[in-house]
Image (cartoon, rainbow, N blue to C red):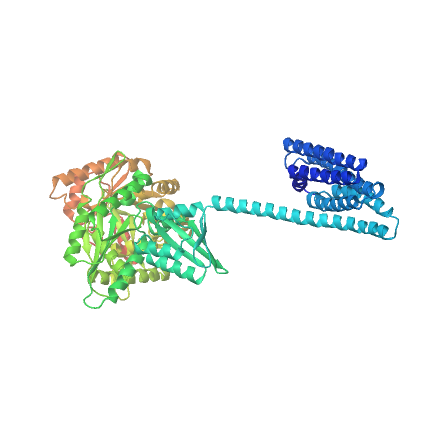
Amino acid sequence: MPTLDYVSIVRSVYGDRRALLAGAFASALAAGLSAYKAQSLALYLVALAFLGVGLIRYLNMRAFWKAAIESDDAEAAEHWEFRAVIGGGLVATVYGVWCLVAMVLVDDPYAELVATSLSIAAMVGVCARNFGLDRLVTIQTLLLVFPLSIGLMLGGDLYHPVLAGLLIVMLVSFRKLAADIRSILLSAVHGRVEASRLAGELDMAMSTMQHGLCMLDENGAVTVVNERAVRIFALLEITDLLGRPFAGILAELGADGRLPYSAVDRLIDMADKRASGKVLLCLPLGRYYEVTVSSRRERSVMLFEDISERIAAEERITFMARHDALTELPNRAYFSDLVVEDLKARRAVSGPTRTICLMIIDIDDFKHVNDTLGHIVGDQLLTEVALRLRKAVPPDAVLARLGGDEFVVYRRQIDSAGAAQREADRILAAFRAPFHLDGLTLSSDVSVGIVTSQSGDDDIDALMTKADLALYTAKGDGKGRSQIFHTQMDIDYHYRQRLKTDLREAVRTGSLTLAFQPLIDLETRRVVTCEALARWDHPDLGSIPPSTFIPLAEEIGLISDLTAWVLESATAQCSLWPGDVGVAINISARDFRGANMGWLVEQALLRSGLPAHRLEIEVTETAVIEEHDVALGVLRNLAAQGISIALDDFGTGYSSLSYLNALPFTKLKIDRSFVVDIGTNPRALRLLTNVARLGRDLNLTVVAEGVETQEQLNILVAHTRIQQVQGFLFSRPLPAHDIVELIAHFNAPPPPEAITRRHG
């Protein structure tokens, strides 16, 4: 038996000491009366025995309650059970002796009746009081029934022994009765303990659960509510919930706007129909609760879960998915969604179509900022640009970052193209002031491409393409300006797209050709090198100038293939030329990035059999600056093989003298812009003279490009230390078969004394 049950049963034995004492006195009084009537000393002694045993048991009970044993003290309970057995055994013995004395020693029917009836009644009391302790019930029953049975068996007839036998049946039935009562009591105790435990757990669960809970009865009234639910409704100024119809509470909240009508109606409908589901509630102070309704057997339970943090997290995730992390502007995808939605709404409206405007804004020379000042400064600049754009565009404009250094503005309605131009001018004006970034003062302009549309058929892709074409034109016109799209731009765009496609095919099929322009040594007047120049004769469009298709090749990533072809073809042609005449080949910045330049040169020399000293590689200052580290390694390796390295178009880029010292240049080609005015501008001549002197002092071969007149040649010879010249005065770029004749003419002995006429 569990300790708790055992201790509880022992306590029940010591239940009511006053009733026990009263029973003892009543039994003593009955024994005394029968003794008086029968004038029996033995019965007087029985009466005294009742008083004595009753007093002893009373004192024992007082001692038990004074001891106050714990509910889990099984050892103490066993001690007090033993004392209860002693006390119960004594009183049962007195009852048994009483019956035996009355039947055997006293010849008085009244005494027999009183003794027997009270003893049987005492047995009932034993079962009622001591049912929990089987040992005590058994001992008391035996000690009482055994003397009583002896008295009956000595009655002298057949009937009394039969009655004595029936007493044994009564003993068994009393024990069974006690066991049944004990089982019922223990079951009730267990049920009460379990109910108490469940009630405690339910109370703890409701008081500690993180959600509010309301339970509705079959009439829709609130019957159970926890503390958190009380606090939730307190936010809505509802303080009394229990017993009130929940639908009435909701109706009150919806009537004065404390809860949205839609949520109130749905909750009322679910409560009335005993349905299940979820409803989102928005409470004051920006709190969000998800109400889960569960119904069963005409009752409903509503669980109020605070999902404010989850909503905030979801909103943050949505914001991050739709906005640029650096500037917090809408990103390309979200911008597209907004514009597409507006274009759909615009098409759905009948009547005149409103004019819309889209602008693409690009930061001029942003790559240079990243390359020279680092990406941290670049990110700071992007952030500041976003701030200025927010202030420059109208409040209802949609401003977004497309990526990199590009931003975009969408205007849902604008008066005219002129109004769009004025807004673009305000954007340009916002960038006139320099930026101050962590101690750096940086000036940065933007270019703006604009497109306006009254057509309902334009989609976002068409608008973006047109604005991008306008931006391309603005940058081509000098940057720091805006340009509105016009139809010719679209024509030019499709023309460029066709050229790109046809150029790929021309490179693939080898449809390009080479032309060569000689470089003349001023001292010997002989051809020393020929610069290889690619030419493209389009079958439909005619001759496409290099200034058009070379940038296209760079744009579509074809420049490295083109360079490889020029290397192969030019070295093969040069190997057929007489003497040591070399060939010069131009290399772009993209060639350093996209091709294994050293390997291409090595393969071209190997296939053509051309000596390395007859090959010259020309690079521009821009290529060296953009890919400095890669270019340095490649050019040094080429120079180590005996290949000449020329710096082309000197003076048109940054003209940093550090590059002349760091890179293995052997030749300096001065740009034609230095030569064109030397006949009329003394300042231009002095500049050219000093640049040539600088090259000679660095032990470089100095070349003047763009020599077109005899006057220019005479001035160069008379006033500068330039060693080689290149220009139309001597020859235009010639095809391969003509350049061989030109070389033979210039280099045939004896050399000509003067060369005054043009060739080609």
Residue positioned 14% across, 46% down in the render: 711
Rendered view: 727 above or below 662: below
**Position of the N terminus by quadrant:** top right
Rendered view: 756 above or below 632: below
Residue positioned 81% across, 52% down in the render: 166
**Position of the C terminus by quadrant:** bottom left
Residue 400 can be seen in this image: yes
Front residue of 757/711: it is 711
Front residue of 614/557: it is 557
In this rendering, position of residue 738 left or right of residue 267: left
Location of residue 638 in the rendering, given as x and y in whole percent from the top left corner: 38, 43
Residue 514 can be seen in this image: no
Tell me where residue 82 sits by quadrant: top right
Location of residue 451 in the rendering, given as x and y in whole percent from the top left corner: 21, 58
Front residue of 456/664: it is 456
Rendered view: 679 above or below 61: below
* Number of numbered labels in the structure image: 0
- The single residue placed furthest to the left in the displayed view is 680
In this rendering, position of residue 599 left or right of residue 342: right
Location of residue 509 in the rendering, given as x and y in whole percent from the top left corner: 36, 62
Front residue of 572/250: it is 250
Location of residue 678 in the rendering, given as x and y in whole percent from the top left corner: 14, 43
